[in-house]
Amino acid sequence: MATSVKEKKVSKPKAVKAAQGEEVTKLRIRVRAYEHKILDASLKQIMDTAIRYDVQFFGPIPLPTEIKKYTVNRASFVFKNAREQFEMRVHKRLIDILNPNQKIIEALTNLNLPSGVNIDVKMM
């Protein structure tokens, strides 16, 4: 007995709609750092700024850690089997701020974050 199963196609909304029917603008902040403690401290500053200006945000969302491994010979000429391995870990987090106003954007640009923290900001 063969039965056919009908598949439902679920369509994703093209843009997130607000309650009034207007489109929601998002400020997507992607933060990268080599040390997770410094990364978490800078994320806390960003979240405190968003709370201070009473803006709705989602996050921090942890993204997969990027691991780069390097293998190096210990000796320059002989002893090929003697090798060392080094790795660099890049920790990443993501924060979405919904409907950002001019005050929150100005406050985020004036934040004094520690060195070694890379920030990418996109307006969606």
Image (cartoon, helix red, strand yellow):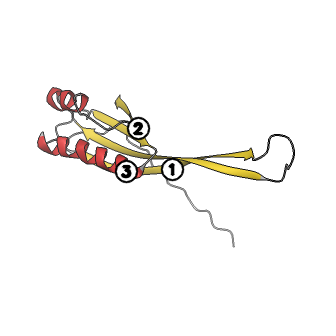
Q: CA distance from mark 2 to mark 1?
A: 16 Å
User: In the figure, is residue 43 to the left or right of 32?
Assistant: left
The percent position of residue 9, horizontal first and vertical second, equals 49, 49
Q: Which residue is pictured at 58% across the width and 62% down the height? A: 5
- Asked if 49 appears above or below 84 in the picture, the reply is above
Label 1: element kind: strand
- Asked if 18 appears above or below 85 in the picture, the reply is above
Residue 116: which numbered mark, if any? 2
Q: Amino acid at mark 2?
A: Gly
Q: Quadrant of the N terminus?
A: bottom right
Q: Crowding at label 2, few (<14), some or many (≥20) Cα neighbours within 10 Å?
A: few
Q: Which residue is pictured at 20% across the width and 44% down the height? A: 56
Q: Which residue is pictured at 62% across the width and 63% down the height? A: 4
Q: Quadrant of the C terminus?
A: top left
Residue 65: which numbered mark, if any? 1
Residue 61: which numbered mark, if any? 3
* Camera-nearest label, 3 or 1: 1
